[in-house]
């Protein structure tokens, strides 16, 4: 699904990804944790070429993302992304927000996009908000809409970049509950988060990054109880 080998990424002189080797299988749920600035966002943004790698191999569904003429729109339709700040269109209704890309990019018939959109709004518990505008919704509700929007592209992978870190504490769980529900599907999920309860219950694999490198990877059981990596231990002691 996602294959990265010896990936390096620089922003100017700043070496932000260092020899990343990572393979993610179909349906896998991977949680990426690590201190701020360690390269987590950059890594997942390289998975749909929101960022370009400097050198190494990056393939998604056998598409080589380093090729200038790679069919990147096709990749982005399979690899959806949910951002920290929801990124909804404020002047469009909720239903318009979640049908826009299917209609415009995927050329799905409007009625069909609305039908599936309503199905996903129902899945995230917001079918009654279809005709509201984003500003009329709470942050937690807006993020649930953003997840429904991702689902309405029928992606094979969803990348989540700290989806709950912009939310008030009382809204975090409703978004995590939606993500836990999605984890039942066969969609591959790559989630950057500091929510360790979620990581424990959903992740097949935890990846710990520090200073641009993957320094530890393992199942939640092994990672949380047995990591011997000192940076990982320090990190965990601060957030658990
Ligand atoms: P994290 O998500 O783990 O907090 P990031 O991937 O956002 O880390 O950032 C890793 C490093 O890359 C940081 O030093 C950050 O300042 C730098 N960086 C991230 N995005 C950019 C950018 N668009 N331009 C320049 N530097 C960037
Ligand atoms: Mg980040």
Image: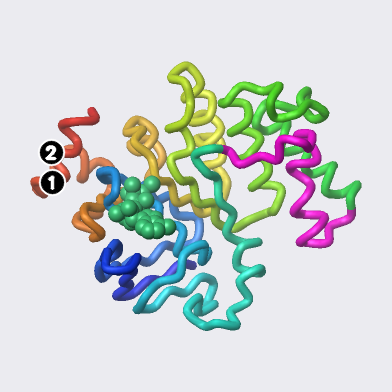
Percent x, y of residue 28:
45, 54
- The quadrant of the picture showing ligand 1 is bottom left
Percent x, y of residue 72:
61, 71
Location of mark 1 (residue): 231
- Relative to residue 44, is residue 158 drawn left or right? right
**Magenta residue span:** 86-109
Residue at the front extreme of this rendering: 12
Label 2, ligand 1: CB separation under 8 Å: no
Snapshot quadrant of residue 154 = bottom right
CA neighbours of label 2 inside 10 A, class few (<14), some (14 to 19), many (20+): few
Contact check, label 1 and label 2, Cβ < 8 Å: yes
- Relative to residue 22, is residue 128 drawn left or right? right
Asked if residue 108 is among those painted magenta in the image, a careful observer would answer: yes
- Does dot 1 land on a helix, a strand or a loop? helix
Residue at the top extreme of this rendering: 170
The residue shown at (78%, 23%) is: 128
The residue shown at (36%, 33%) is: 195
* Label annotation for residue 203: none
For the question of whether residue 204 can be seen, the reply is: no
The residue shown at (75%, 28%) is: 133
Location of mark 2 (residue): 234
168 or 25, nearer to the observer: 168
Percent x, y of residue 220:
28, 43
C-alpha separation, residue under disc 1 versus residue under disc 2? 5 Å
Snapshot quadrant of residue 73 = bottom right
11 or 207, nearer to the observer: 11
- Relative to residue 208, is residue 54 drawn left or right? right
For the question of whether residue 47 can be seen, the reply is: yes
- Does dot 2 land on a helix, a strand or a loop? helix
Q: How many marks?
A: 2
């Amino acid at each position: 699904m996602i294959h990265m080998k010896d990936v390096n990424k620089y922003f100017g002189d700043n070496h932000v990804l260092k020899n990343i080797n990572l393979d993610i299988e179909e349906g896998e749920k991977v949680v990426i944790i690590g201190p701020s600035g360690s390269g987590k966002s950059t890594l997942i943004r390289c998975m749909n070429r929101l960022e370009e790698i400097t050198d190494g191999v990056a393939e998604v569904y056998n598409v080589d993302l380093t090729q200038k003429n790679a069919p990147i729109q096709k990749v982005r339709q399979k690899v959806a992304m949910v951002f920290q700040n929801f990124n909804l269109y404020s002047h469009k209704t909720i239903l318009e927000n979640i049908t826009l890309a299917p209609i415009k990019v995927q050329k799905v018939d409007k009625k069909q996009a609305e039908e599936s959109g309503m199905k996903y709004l129902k899945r995230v518990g917001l079918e009654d908000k279809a005709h509201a505008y984003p500003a009329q919704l709470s942050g937690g509700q807006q993020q649930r809409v953003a997840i429904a929007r991702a689902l309405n592209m029928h992606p094979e992978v969803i990348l989540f970049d700290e989806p709950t870190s912009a939310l008030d504490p009382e809204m975090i769980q409703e978004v995590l509950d939606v993500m836990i529900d999605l984890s039942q599907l066969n969609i591959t999920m790559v989630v950057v988060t500091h929510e360790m309860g979620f990581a424990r219950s959903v992740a097949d694999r935890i990846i710990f990054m520090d200073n641009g490198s993957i320094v530890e990877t393992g199942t939640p059981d092994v990672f949380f109880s047995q990591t011997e990596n000192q940076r990982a231990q320090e990190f965990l002691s601060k957030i658990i």
